Image (cartoon, rainbow, N blue to C red):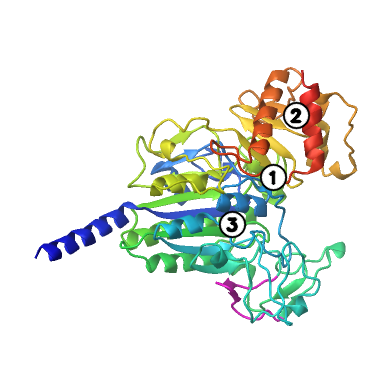
Amino acid sequence: MNKLLLIMLLFLGCNVFASEKPNVIFILADDMGHGDVVELNSECKFPTPNLDRLAREGMAFTQAYTGSSICTPTRYGLMTGRYCWRENIGLAGNYASRRLVENQQTVANLFRSQGYKTHCVGKWHLGTSWTYKDGSIQEDFVRIKDDMDIDFTADFHGGPVDHGFDTWFGIAGSLDFAPYVYLKDRCATKVPSERVPADATKGRKHRFGQRSGLADPDLQPNQVLGDFTREAVRVIGQQNADQPFFLYMPLNAPHSPTCPSPDFVGKSGMNEHADIRMEIDWCVGQVLQALEEKGLDENTLIIFSADNGSHSGPSRTLPAFGHDTHDGRRGQKAMLFEGGHRVPFLVRWPGGLKGELNRRDTRNITLEDFVATCAEILGTETPIHAVDSLSFLPQLKNKEPHEGQRQAIFSSLGGTVIVRKDEWKLILKSEAYLVAREKGKHQSLKDDPDAPWFEQVTLYNLKNDVAETTNVARQNPERVGLLLRYLEAAIENGRSTVGAPQSKPDINDSKVQFMKFLKENVK
């Protein structure tokens, strides 16, 4: 009898422990500005009721930043808790090989180690190394010369299931990068047999964009967001309260090609960029409904964010309808201004959030912080590799943030480093470069090494100048020096968070020399 009682108590204890672990869903939009949610921007010109619900029934971080202003590097930081510039992670293009080295641990590995089921639905964009018809495997960071050499019936490598996920359904990269075919776990769902041509010189586009590649002839870009949503709902429907799950849902939208489904074409009364944002809101609503139907709503933490700001299409066309996708901030995707990095970050967790609902936290966080936050929620140590991840769980619990929160160090499409602390933002590029980059004329602009130091960097006070109009570096040399010391320490220690020093990153020599110049000259 005593043995039976002990077994029952152990069984009940295990189930109580399991039930205390929240399910976690991270929905990552692709190119979406902070101004694209009504609850964050009262001037938003299209309805977002489901995103608004996340904020009203949860909270929002209004100073949330991505590790980069483009896709691949940001996703690297979200998955690993490491700044992308440490490994010089750049954009993964057509048929891009893996960007995560073999055995690289991710947040999915963390969840799996704690007994979670782990699922990915959507755009990976961290590279997949393809198998060739001769049996060899695409080398890391090497592009494929001829896609006819790929064996689409064989396994590829470096996808989500090689980095902690139990299952994956999605696409390799952005919807305008080949191959244009759905992938499942380690295989293509079918052999792409249609050659879609590229002829950008004549302004021609195929249905996915302008990049040549192989496609599934039955795949249409306007079905992808809906297919991802339905797959996520199916995955949630397979879960139960006995084992927690982590669902990473990186969407393909609003990134180009901007193709809302037929049900959403014209729905905004504006244009396709507004329509697709309404469809994304619908997607979030479907996830919430699926959780409620399974009785998992109370114990599920949902985060909605984006990998960077909106691209040029909505940035250029939506103002005609009175809508500002970047909520008063300058710039857009791939730029160094706030419009490139500042993104919506909504958190809903009915059973876990403490304090007043629908509150705003104005302190800096980055997407890299997701790893450490999950570790703290699970009651385990932050993984040793996650050297740039600082938990924001205290803010979720309505407490003061961890000591040292939070200087943020992120980068742009060209790898330029930005340091943000409190209201100050230092960009290691001249104001002349920023203006030229904004106009698309930066390629011909040469740095002047003989210019005074304050003309080679740009410092903004975002409290007084949210639109980043005035470089105040010359008037604030002590602030420039302080931000430089933060960057230097992050490089020298191999980490930006408190902890044992790690190996130094392989930083480009020119960046090191530029920092040396600044240290010697900033007075």
**Foreground: 297 or 376?**
376
SS class of the residue under badge 3? helix
Q: Is residue 309 left or right of residue 142?
A: left
Magenta span: helix, strand or loop, mainly?
A: loop
From this viewpoint, which residue is outermost toward the left? 1
Task: Please provide percent x and percent y for residue 344.
Answer: 54, 43
Kind of residue at disc 1: Pro
Q: Earlier in the sequence, mark 2 or mark 1?
A: 2
Task: Please provide percent x and percent y for residue 269.
Answer: 59, 53
The CA span between labels 2 and 3 is 35 Å
**Residue 519 among magenta residues:** no
Residue visible at 43% across and 69% down in the picture: 234
Residue visible at 75% across and 29% down in the picture: 458
Q: Is residue 210 left or right of residue 186?
A: right
Identify whether 476 is placed above or below 496: above
Task: Please provide percent x and percent y for residue 340.
Answer: 67, 43
SS class of the residue under badge 2? strand
Q: Quadrant of residue 315?
A: top right
Kind of residue at disc 2: Thr
**Residue 190 among magenta residues:** yes
Q: Which residue is mark 1?
A: 505
Magenta-colored span: 179-193
Q: Which residue is mark 2?
A: 458
Residue 69 visible here? no
Q: Which residue is mark 3?
A: 276
